[in-house]
């Protein structure tokens, strides 16, 4: 952060945005970002390729959703399952992007001794962590939007069917949701980078949490579900409440929230996420939901993700502000 | 001598002739010829033709060839004398033999009731004949139908058979008309073709078919339809009767025809329905019912329509109450209006929308978190 106050243009920029700009340029030029983005781009293009190969069959078999062909680019994979669909990749590799960008946000500066030098400047102390978070969020947003529009553009070229306004809005909301989801992992990584002095420790801790929620959490919930299964259940209500309880357990995982929300957004025929009773199905017409209703359906998921992101940020903020900054 | 004898005979004949009017039994007085027919006094109706078979008997020993004539026929009556397939004026009869002569007399249509006499003469023989016309002769047209009454639904057509009898002396061209109420369609058919007039020869009959189609919105009841066949000089009329049995039909819809609505889960929605009686008979006690998804309620105001006249419509307010557990999206609600006679269904597509209450709750949570972060900024940020 040598050229912190190097003003290239004549207009004075607020010091906070100078820090944000610097952070963005540092990140974009780093090998780490390029590698991470490269992995995401390659896998996403791969999934797009398989989607385009199998979209013809998918459209033919699913009559009810034929008006939402474009969304299938993001949700369809080939029947053999060689490559998962786009949304699965974002759900799986997005956290890695967030963690990769954020795990050494604070502690590397601290270890290199640059933190105390920044603090020597006449700026507020919380500018450091706020600028880090803002800059990383901007980088992630740009990456995700670029990726999303890249897929849309290539899909447009390949299948030749333009998206309807509703499809476009659904994809837009999906991208925003992805940004929130990655922002959560970013904040978690920043939190660990504030907490742990060593970048390796914070990286390991972040990846451990990520692995826990992506791989082990569902196993644990299944074990709990098996243990709690009401073998003597007599009424449908008992089974129903059991199912709902298991679902609530699942939803503690951010990846579960994200996958449910994206499925609802990109598959308009999804009308509910909980277990369905016969009473609810009777008289229902299998028709796609309007976008507004889909958004209301997953609004709790949005709330949960945004709140979790902000809580992580708040904790790391408090920790950072309470920490002593010594020069080496 | 011969001349003298002839003169005497003529005198005798005149005497006999004068006496025959007074006493017909005197006919077969001895003479060289006599005439015989069994039916000398016949009763007929106007327009009939009478066939007499008259035997001309030769009493003498010579061949007789008398001149045959019919005298005293009233004006307008026509006759013809034939024998052996020929129209004849004279006939020859061998001695002591007889010959048969046919006399056809046509009684005209226009003839007064009464007794008419005329004579057939063959030389000196005279046969007086009497015809009694038992009816007053007419000069008119008759229009009759065997089955003037028919019953059917409003959407069926009615076929009547009528006969025009021309009881006039001339050929007539009849114009056919029907005095049907507005909206009724009456067609006349003769020989398989739709016609407006028919030609009927004098004293002949003509069968015509009358096809009556009632209007669509015809009401139940009995309708009289007079039909006339008329020319400038004569006309005839008869009345056909159509009995329409009522049809029952019912339609349930909305005033603007829109059969979809939206509703918030757990909320209520008022719908205006329209019940139309599209039949031709009044409907009574129309019950309104709804077939809903589970835990939904539909109430109607009014629940029953006491009477709905044919062709009329009335509005009913339906209040749909959705189940609080209903999932977002489309549901089908079937509503029906039924009477024992007819029923109608309307399928409503009800779009359920999730209540926004929990959405606001989520926004509140996010606002609380933002507030917390802001508090942290204020507490720690600006040291």
Image (cartoon, rainbow, N blue to C red):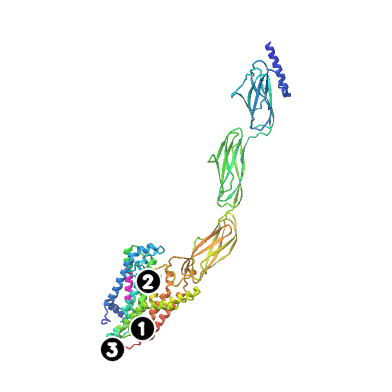
B37, above or below B146, in the image: above
Res. B383 in view: no
The chain letter for the residue carrying disc 1 is: A
Give the label on residue A174, or none: 2
Discs 1, 2: same chain: yes
Given residues B256 and B247, the one toward you in this image is: B247
- Residue A52, image quadrant: bottom left
Which is more foreground, mark 3 or mark 2? 2
- Quadrant that contains the N terminus of chain B: top right
Extreme residue toward the front, this view: A231
Element type at mark 3: loop
Which of the two labelled residues, at mark 1 and mark 2, occupies the earlier sequence position? 2
Q: Position of residue B318 (x, y in %)?
A: 54, 65
Q: Find the magenta span and give its range.
A: A138-150
Q: Where does residue A163 sit, x and y in percent of width and height?
A: 36, 65
Q: Give the class, few, some or many, for how many residues have Cα within 10 Å of label 1's Cα (few <14, many ≥20).
A: many
How dense is the environment of label 2, judged by Cα within 10 Å: few (below 14), some, or many (20 and up)?
A: many
Q: Main secondary structure of the magenta part?
A: helix
Tell me if I can see residue A139 in this picture: yes
| Marker disc for residue A327 | 3
Q: Earlier in the sequence, mark 1 or mark 3?
A: 1
Question: What secondary structure is marked by label 1?
Answer: helix
Mark 3 and mark 2: Cα distance apart in space: 44 Å
Q: Is residue A315 magenta?
A: no
Q: In this view of the protein, which residue sits in the foreground, A247 or B142?
A: A247
Residue bearing the label numbered 1: A316
């Amino acid at each position: 952060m040598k050229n912190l106050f190097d003003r290239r243009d004549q207009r004075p920029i607020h010091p906070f945005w100078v820090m944000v700009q610097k952070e963005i340029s540092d990140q974009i030029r780093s090998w780490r970002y390029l590698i991470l983005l490269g992995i995401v781009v390659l896998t996403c293009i791969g999934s797009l390729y398989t989607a385009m190969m199998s979209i013809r069959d998918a459209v033919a078999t699913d009559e009810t959703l034929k008006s939402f062909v474009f969304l299938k680019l993001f949700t369809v994979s080939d029947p053999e399952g060689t490559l998962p669909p786009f949304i699965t990749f974002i759900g799986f590799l997005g956290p890695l992007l967030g963690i990769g960008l954020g795990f050494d946000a604070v502690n590397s500066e601290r270890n290199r001794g640059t933190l105390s030098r920044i603090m020597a400047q006449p700026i507020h102390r919380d500018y450091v962590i706020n600028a880090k978070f803002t800059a990383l969020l901007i980088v992630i947003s740009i990456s995700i939007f670029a990726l999303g529009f890249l897929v849309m553009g290539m899909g447009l070229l390949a299948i030749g069917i333009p998206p309807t306004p509703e499809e476009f809005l659904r994809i837009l909301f999906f991208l925003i949701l992805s940004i929130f989801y990655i922002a959560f992992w970013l904040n978690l990584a920043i939190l660990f980078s504030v907490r742990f002095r060593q970048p390796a420790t914070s990286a390991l801790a972040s990846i451990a949490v990520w692995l826990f929620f992506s791989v082990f959490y569902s196993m644990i919930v299944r074990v709990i579900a098996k243990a709690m299964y009401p073998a003597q259940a007599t009424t449908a209500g008992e089974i129903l409440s059991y199912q709902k309880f298991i679902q609530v357990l699942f939803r503690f995982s951010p990846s579960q929230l994200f996958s449910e929300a994206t499925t609802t957004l990109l598959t308009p025929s999804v009308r509910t996420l909980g277990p369905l009773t016969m009473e609810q199905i009777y008289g229902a017409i299998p028709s796609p939901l309007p976008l507004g209703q889909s958004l209301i359906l997953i609004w709790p998921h949005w709330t949960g993700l945004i709140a979790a992101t902000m809580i992580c940020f708040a904790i790391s903020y408090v920790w950072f502000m309470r920490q002593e900054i010594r020069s080496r | 001598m011969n001349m003298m004898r002839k003169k005497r005979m003529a005198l005798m004949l005149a005497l006999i002739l004068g006496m025959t009017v007074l006493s017909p039994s005197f006919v077969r007085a001895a003479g060289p010829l006599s005439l015989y027919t069994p039916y000398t006094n016949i009763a007929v109706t106007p327009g009939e033709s009478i066939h007499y078979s008259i035997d001309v008997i030769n009493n003498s020993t010579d061949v007789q060839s008398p001149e045959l004539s019919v005298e005293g026929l009233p004006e307008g009556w026509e006759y013809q004398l034939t024998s052996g397939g020929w129209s004849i004026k004279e006939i020859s009869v061998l001695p002591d033999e007889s010959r048969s002569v046919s006399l056809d007399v046509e009684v005209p249509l226009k003839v007064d009731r009464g007794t008419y006499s005329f004579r057939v003469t063959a030389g000196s023989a005279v046969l007086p004949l009497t015809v009694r016309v038992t009816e007053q002769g007419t000069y008119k047209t008759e229009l009759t139908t065997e089955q003037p009454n028919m019953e059917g639904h409003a959407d069926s057509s009615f076929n009547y058979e009528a006969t025009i009898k021309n009881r006039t002396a001339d050929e007539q061209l009849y114009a056919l008309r029907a005095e049907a109420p507005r909206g009724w369609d009456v067609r006349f058919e003769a020989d398989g073709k739709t016609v407006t007039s028919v030609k009927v020869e004098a004293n002949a009959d003509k069968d015509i078919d009358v096809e009556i189609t009632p209007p669509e919105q015809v009401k139940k009841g009995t309708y009289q339809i007079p039909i006339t066949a008329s020319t400038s000089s004569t006309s005839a009329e008869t009345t056909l009767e159509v009995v329409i049995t009522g049809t029952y039909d019912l339609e349930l819809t909305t005033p603007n025809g829109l059969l979809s609505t939206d509703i918030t889960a757990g909320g209520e929605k008022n719908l205006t329905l329209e019940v139309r009686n599209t039949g031709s008979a009044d409907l009574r006690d129309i019950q309104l019912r709804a077939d809903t998804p589970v835990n939904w309620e539909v109430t109607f105001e009014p629940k029953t329509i006491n009477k709905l006249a044919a062709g009329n419509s009335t509005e009913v307010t339906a209040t749909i109450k959705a189940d609080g557990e209903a999932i977002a999206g489309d549901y089908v609600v079937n509503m029906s209006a039924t009477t024992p006679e007819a029923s109608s269904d309307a399928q409503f597509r009800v779009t359920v929308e999730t209540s926004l209450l929990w959405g606001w709750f989520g926004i509140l949570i996010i606002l609380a978190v933002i507030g917390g972060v802001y508090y942290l900024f204020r507490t720690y940020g600006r040291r």
